Image (spheres, rainbow, N blue to C red):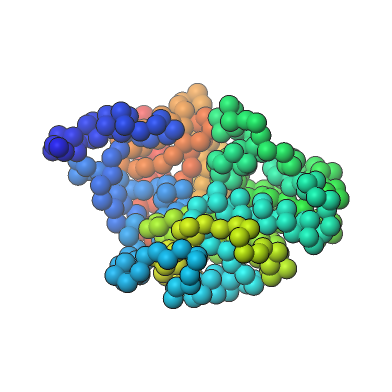
Amino acid sequence: MTTVESLRTPGAVADAERWTAHNYHPLPVVISEASGAWVTDVDGRRYLDFLAGYSALNFGHRHPALVAAAHAQLDRLTLTSRAFLHDQFADFCRGLAELCNTDLVLPMNTGAEAVETAIKVARKWGYQVKGVPDGQATIVVAENNFHGRTTTIVSFSTDPTARNDFGPYTPGFRIVPYGDLDALRAAVDDTTVAVLLEPIQGEAGVIVPPPGYLTGVRALCSERGVLFLADEIQSGLGRTGTTFACEHEGVVPDMYILGKALGGGIVPLSAVAASREVLGVLRPGEHGSTFGGNPLACAVGSAVIGLLRTGEYQRRSRVLGRQLHAGLEKLIGHGVLAVRGRGLWAGVDIDPALMTGRRAGELLAERGVLVKDTHGSTIRLAPPLVIEPDEIDHAVAQLAAILTR
């Protein structure tokens, strides 16, 4: 039986350690409630959420419009499987296709599923449309990428923690340095069906490519008859100040790979969006998902698209992002070595002589701000787009405080 004591942080942390596989190393914070940009733990302490579920919570916790859409759908229909149509499916797919300015959408559940879908579609397109000999298709990816954790995806990861001990690895991928157009050009040949990139690398530490890189990738792919697959799972849907991060260079990929914020922080929802020439290569039975495009997810996803159509959240990310980065840049030379990012998304390199990124996360949690470390002394900041200006200043002040303690 659950006791009051077991609901307190130490007991809940101990239970999690006992009963779950240790594939995560969470901070000792046990959240029980949330609203907007704030969460509350089991002891009643409030924290400013500066991670936002790795951008899954772009619209904050329990956004009223999204919760209302979920409640309304829960009272009617939650799952049919794709064996049948349901009354939310066409509206969601049409809305997302229009948002992406493309023809077709294929809904799935998780980001990794969407990336796997993109890989399969690109290969089939390569064989059927480009004419690559069967079994020889190659896809070019970037070093320090993060596209998920399936066995296929970790096969082209360069992160030892994600990759080691999970072989044998799937062939067919070529890895080049991120941001290096010459290396990319050298890797593309007649067997290449796609280039798969994050417009901004999230897990690597919010790495923004050099100016003109995405434009060059687009030009190269068009020139060589190769699909440009843009993984906008973390960078998309308002996070960087535009609907998609590719827009910062006026680039339109051949396929958008979307997830995280598409589900509004309520349900897992992902999708790929592309032209009829590309996604039209699939035939019934060749790819699918029991829960992909389910009524509940589509209802929430349509509400998310409705929020994005207003442009309010993209604007907030642009305006408040300038405030966030201005505050962070003042810390350079005062415990911070570098700051990167766009909109309400930042990678902050803390001087490793001071502390690790993990320690920074622990100290910030003690001061009521939640962040996540990545790769040594780097922390990532990705507050919900509903955050207020004074809350940004508060979080930056807490970071400054732990660096000078």
Residue at 37%, 42% in the rendered image: 370
Which residue is the extreme one toward the top? 353
Q: Quadrant of the N terminus?
A: top left
Image quadrant of residue 68?
bottom left
Comparing 361 with 94, the one in front is 94
Residue at 38%, 35% in the rendered image: 26
Vertical arrangement, residue 103 with respect to residue 62, above or below: below
* Residue 180 coordinates in the image, percent (x, y): 76, 44
Q: Is residue 7 left or right of residue 402?
A: left
Q: Is residue 157 left or right of residue 132?
A: left
Residue at 63%, 58% in the rendered image: 286
* Residue 4 coordinates in the image, percent (x, y): 13, 38
* Residue 32 coordinates in the image, percent (x, y): 25, 47
Kindly tell me whether residue 101 is visible in this rendering: yes
Vertical arrangement, residue 39 with respect to residue 286, above or below: above
Image quadrant of residue 274?
bottom right
Image quadrant of residue 280?
bottom right
